[in-house]
Image (tube, rainbow, N blue to C red):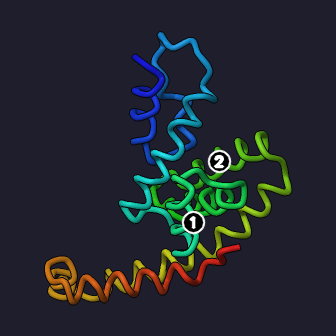
Protein backbone atom coordinates (compact mmCIF):
# COMPACT_ATOMS: atom_id res chain seq x y z
CA UNK A 1 0.00 0.00 0.00
CA UNK A 2 1.45 3.39 -1.01
CA UNK A 3 1.64 6.37 1.33
CA UNK A 4 -1.02 8.11 -0.78
CA UNK A 5 -3.41 5.19 -0.36
CA UNK A 6 -2.78 5.09 3.39
CA UNK A 7 -3.31 8.87 3.59
CA UNK A 8 -6.61 8.61 1.68
CA UNK A 9 -7.78 5.80 3.95
CA UNK A 10 -6.86 7.65 7.13
CA UNK A 11 -8.41 10.91 5.91
CA UNK A 12 -11.81 9.16 5.86
CA UNK A 13 -11.71 8.74 9.65
CA UNK A 14 -13.48 11.63 11.40
CA UNK A 15 -11.68 11.20 14.74
CA UNK A 16 -8.20 12.67 14.26
CA UNK A 17 -6.99 11.34 17.57
CA UNK A 18 -7.30 7.70 16.43
CA UNK A 19 -5.43 8.03 13.14
CA UNK A 20 -2.34 6.46 14.73
CA UNK A 21 -4.32 3.30 15.43
CA UNK A 22 -5.22 2.78 11.76
CA UNK A 23 -1.81 2.32 10.18
CA UNK A 24 -1.20 -1.02 8.46
CA UNK A 25 1.15 -3.22 10.47
CA UNK A 26 3.30 -3.64 7.39
CA UNK A 27 3.98 0.12 7.08
CA UNK A 28 7.45 1.09 8.29
CA UNK A 29 7.78 4.64 6.92
CA UNK A 30 7.22 8.01 8.54
CA UNK A 31 3.73 8.54 9.92
CA UNK A 32 4.36 12.28 9.84
CA UNK A 33 4.55 12.21 6.02
CA UNK A 34 1.23 10.40 5.84
CA UNK A 35 -0.40 12.78 8.32
CA UNK A 36 0.74 15.72 6.19
CA UNK A 37 -0.84 14.13 3.11
CA UNK A 38 -4.02 13.10 4.93
CA UNK A 39 -4.74 16.36 6.75
CA UNK A 40 -5.82 18.48 3.75
CA UNK A 41 -7.92 15.58 2.44
CA UNK A 42 -9.61 15.32 5.84
CA UNK A 43 -10.16 19.10 6.12
CA UNK A 44 -11.68 19.26 2.64
CA UNK A 45 -14.01 16.31 3.35
CA UNK A 46 -15.09 17.66 6.73
CA UNK A 47 -15.89 21.06 5.18
CA UNK A 48 -17.85 19.46 2.35
CA UNK A 49 -19.82 17.37 4.84
CA UNK A 50 -20.37 20.44 7.04
CA UNK A 51 -18.76 18.75 10.02
CA UNK A 52 -16.31 21.52 10.90
CA UNK A 53 -17.49 24.36 13.10
CA UNK A 54 -15.34 27.22 11.88
CA UNK A 55 -16.06 30.74 10.63
CA UNK A 56 -17.16 30.91 6.94
CA UNK A 57 -14.25 33.24 6.13
CA UNK A 58 -11.82 30.68 7.53
CA UNK A 59 -13.43 28.06 5.30
CA UNK A 60 -12.81 30.35 2.30
CA UNK A 61 -9.20 30.82 3.38
CA UNK A 62 -8.74 27.06 3.65
CA UNK A 63 -10.08 26.65 0.11
CA UNK A 64 -7.51 29.17 -1.14
CA UNK A 65 -4.76 27.36 0.79
CA UNK A 66 -5.67 23.98 -0.74
CA UNK A 67 -6.97 22.94 2.67
CA UNK A 68 -3.53 23.22 4.29
CA UNK A 69 -4.33 24.88 7.65
CA UNK A 70 -2.05 27.37 9.35
CA UNK A 71 -1.21 26.98 13.03
CA UNK A 72 -4.12 29.26 13.99
CA UNK A 73 -6.52 27.37 11.73
CA UNK A 74 -5.33 24.10 13.28
CA UNK A 75 -6.34 25.48 16.67
CA UNK A 76 -9.77 26.34 15.28
CA UNK A 77 -10.11 22.86 13.80
CA UNK A 78 -9.20 21.17 17.08
CA UNK A 79 -11.67 23.42 18.91
CA UNK A 80 -14.31 22.28 16.43
CA UNK A 81 -13.37 18.64 17.02
CA UNK A 82 -13.76 19.11 20.77
CA UNK A 83 -17.08 20.94 20.41
CA UNK A 84 -18.47 18.42 17.95
CA UNK A 85 -18.03 15.42 20.20
CA UNK A 86 -21.43 14.29 21.40
CA UNK A 87 -20.92 10.58 21.85
CA UNK A 88 -21.22 8.62 25.06
CA UNK A 89 -17.43 8.54 25.36
CA UNK A 90 -16.98 12.30 24.90
CA UNK A 91 -15.27 12.77 28.30
CA UNK A 92 -12.74 10.05 27.51
CA UNK A 93 -12.23 11.43 24.01
CA UNK A 94 -11.73 14.93 25.43
CA UNK A 95 -9.07 13.62 27.83
CA UNK A 96 -7.23 11.76 25.05
CA UNK A 97 -7.26 14.81 22.78
CA UNK A 98 -6.10 17.09 25.59
CA UNK A 99 -3.22 14.78 26.47
CA UNK A 100 -2.07 14.50 22.86
CA UNK A 101 -2.33 18.22 22.16
CA UNK A 102 -0.47 19.10 25.36
CA UNK A 103 2.29 16.66 24.44
CA UNK A 104 2.60 17.85 20.85
CA UNK A 105 2.02 21.62 21.16
CA UNK A 106 2.30 22.61 24.84
CA UNK A 107 0.07 24.28 27.43
CA UNK A 108 -0.41 27.68 25.73
CA UNK A 109 -1.56 26.05 22.49
CA UNK A 110 -3.94 23.75 24.37
CA UNK A 111 -5.42 26.63 26.39
CA UNK A 112 -6.11 28.57 23.19
CA UNK A 113 -7.89 25.54 21.71
CA UNK A 114 -9.85 25.07 24.93
CA UNK A 115 -11.04 28.71 24.90
CA UNK A 116 -12.03 28.48 21.24
CA UNK A 117 -14.14 25.36 21.76
CA UNK A 118 -16.79 27.33 23.67
CA UNK A 119 -17.67 29.45 20.62
CA UNK A 120 -17.71 26.36 18.40
CA UNK A 121 -19.95 24.57 20.89
CA UNK A 122 -22.36 27.54 21.01
CA UNK A 123 -22.58 27.53 17.21
CA UNK A 124 -23.18 23.77 17.20
CA UNK A 125 -26.00 24.14 19.71
CA UNK A 126 -27.62 26.96 17.73
CA UNK A 127 -27.50 24.85 14.57
CA UNK A 128 -28.84 21.80 16.42
CA UNK A 129 -31.72 23.72 17.98
CA UNK A 130 -32.73 25.36 14.71
CA UNK A 131 -32.70 22.09 12.77
CA UNK A 132 -34.11 19.72 15.37
CA UNK A 133 -36.82 21.90 16.88
CA UNK A 134 -38.50 22.56 13.56
CA UNK A 135 -40.46 19.34 13.54
CA UNK A 136 -40.41 16.61 10.96
CA UNK A 137 -42.51 18.38 8.31
CA UNK A 138 -40.28 21.47 8.31
CA UNK A 139 -37.17 19.28 8.34
CA UNK A 140 -38.55 17.49 5.28
CA UNK A 141 -39.07 20.84 3.55
CA UNK A 142 -35.52 21.90 4.47
CA UNK A 143 -34.12 18.70 2.99
CA UNK A 144 -36.26 18.64 -0.16
CA UNK A 145 -36.79 22.22 -1.33
CA UNK A 146 -34.26 24.74 -2.52
CA UNK A 147 -35.86 27.68 -0.71
CA UNK A 148 -35.90 25.98 2.69
CA UNK A 149 -32.46 24.41 2.12
CA UNK A 150 -31.11 27.91 1.42
CA UNK A 151 -32.73 29.16 4.62
CA UNK A 152 -31.15 26.33 6.60
CA UNK A 153 -27.75 27.04 5.03
CA UNK A 154 -28.15 30.72 5.82
CA UNK A 155 -28.94 29.89 9.45
CA UNK A 156 -25.91 27.60 9.60
CA UNK A 157 -23.67 30.38 8.26
CA UNK A 158 -25.07 32.83 10.81
CA UNK A 159 -24.29 30.38 13.58
CA UNK A 160 -20.76 29.81 12.28
CA UNK A 161 -20.18 33.57 12.18
CA UNK A 162 -20.45 33.48 15.98
CA UNK A 163 -17.04 31.80 15.95
CA UNK A 164 -14.10 34.21 15.80
CA UNK A 165 -12.05 34.12 12.61
CA UNK A 166 -8.86 35.21 14.33
User: Which circle marks residue 31 in the picture?
Assistant: none
Residue 130, relative to residue 62: is it above or below? below
Helix, strand or loop at mark 2: helix
Residue 134, how many percent across, how many down?
A: 27, 88
Q: Nearer the viewer, residue 163 or 97?
A: 163
Q: Would you identify the image quadrant in which residue 115 lies?
A: bottom right
Q: Nearer the viewer, residue 8 or 90?
A: 8
Helix, strand or loop at mark 1: helix
Residue 142, relative to residue 90: is it above or below? below
User: Which circle marks residue 61 in the picture?
Assistant: 1
Q: Residue at x 15, y 80 (%)?
A: 140
Residue 70, how many percent across, how many down?
A: 68, 55
Q: Residues within 10 Å of mark 2 (few under 14, many from 20)?
A: many
Q: Nearer the viewer, residue 19 or 63?
A: 63
In the rendered image, which residue does mark 2 sit on? 97
Residue 155, relative to residue 54: is it above or below? below
CA gap, disc 2 and disc 1: 25 Å
Q: Would you identify the image quadrant in which residue 121 lies?
A: bottom right
- Relative horizontal placement of residue 138, taking residue 100 as reference (left or right): left
In the picture, which quadrant includes the N terminus? Answer: top left
Q: Residue at x 44, y 48 (%)?
A: 14
In the picture, which quadrant includes the C terminus? Answer: bottom right
Residue 114, how many percent across, how many down?
A: 72, 63
- Relative horizontal placement of residue 132, taking residue 56 as reference (left or right): left
Amino acid sequence: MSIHEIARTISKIDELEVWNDHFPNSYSGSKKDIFELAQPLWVERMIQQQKLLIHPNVIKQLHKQSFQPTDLQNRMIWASVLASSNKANSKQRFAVIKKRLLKKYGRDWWEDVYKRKNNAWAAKERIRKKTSSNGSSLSTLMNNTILFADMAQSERESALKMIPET
